[in-house]
Amino acid sequence: MAEVALIVGSKSDVAAAKGALDVLDRFGVGWEASVCSAHRAPERLRRVIQEAEDAGTRVFIAGAGMAAALPGAVASMTTRPVVGVPLASGALNGIDALLAIAQMPPGIPVATVAINGAANAAYLAIEILAVNDAQLTAKLADWRKEQSQRIDTFE
Ligand code: RP5
C-alpha cells in the first residue's frame, strides 16, 4: 500500500525529489509518485489527491520550485499531513520556493524542509507514520543509533 504519496510540480523536479523515494524504500514504506502542477493542472491535482487518499495514503510529500504553489494547494485539498520540499530552480534558486511553502496561512499548514531536502521530507513522513507503528519506530531508533556511530568514527 502507498502510505506516502509524493507529488512534484514538473518533470524538471523529478531528479531532485528522488532522494525521498530512496529513504522510503530503505524503511520499507510504500509510496506512489506523480507529476502534477498546481498552476497548470489544478483540476487534475484534486483527482490525484482524492485517488491517493482512496488508496490509503496517510502522508503527502509535495515538491516544487519557483512560485511553488503545489504543497500549499495539496494542503488545501486534504487534511492529511503535507511535507513540502522547496526545490532549487529559476533565478532565485529555491529561496522563492522556500518562502512560498513555509509561509502558509494559519489552519492550512505545510511542514517545510530545507531547499532540496527531499530525504528529510521522507524521514519526517516516516516519523509521522511511526507514531502508530512500533516496527517503524524501532527502525527509526536503529537508524539514529547507526548515525551516531558513524559520526564517532574517524576515517
Ligand atoms: C514549478 O516551476 C515547478 O515545480 C518547477 O520547479 C518550476 C519550473 O517548472 P517547468 O517550467 O520546468 O515545468 O512550478
Image (cartoon, grey):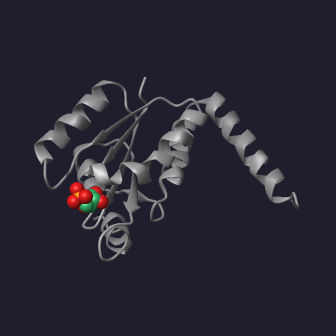
Q: Is residue 15 or residue 98 the one in the foreground?
A: 15
From this view, report whether residue 4 is shown above or below residue 83: above
Total labels: the figure holds 0
Tell me where residue 84 appears, x and y as whole percent: 38, 55
Is residue 90 rendered to the left or right of residue 142?
A: left
From this view, report whether residue 32 is shown above or below residue 86: above
Is residue 89 rendered to the left or right of residue 155?
A: left
From this view, report whether residue 109 is shown above or below residue 29: below
The answer to whether any part of residue 95 appears in the image is: yes
Q: Which residue is pictured at 30% across the width and 68% down the height? A: 100
Is residue 29 rendered to the left or right of residue 31?
A: right
Tell me where residue 105 appears, x and y as whole percent: 28, 65
Quadrant the N terminus occupies: top left
Q: Which residue is pictured at 75% across the width and 51% down the height? A: 147
Tell me where residue 73 appears, x and y as whole percent: 23, 53
Q: Which residue is pictured at 35% across the width and 57% down the height? A: 109
The answer to whether any part of residue 69 appears in the image is: no
Is residue 98 rendered to the left or right of residue 132?
A: left
Q: Is residue 31 or residue 80 the one in the foreground?
A: 31
Q: Which residue is pictured at 13% across the width and 52% down the height? A: 40
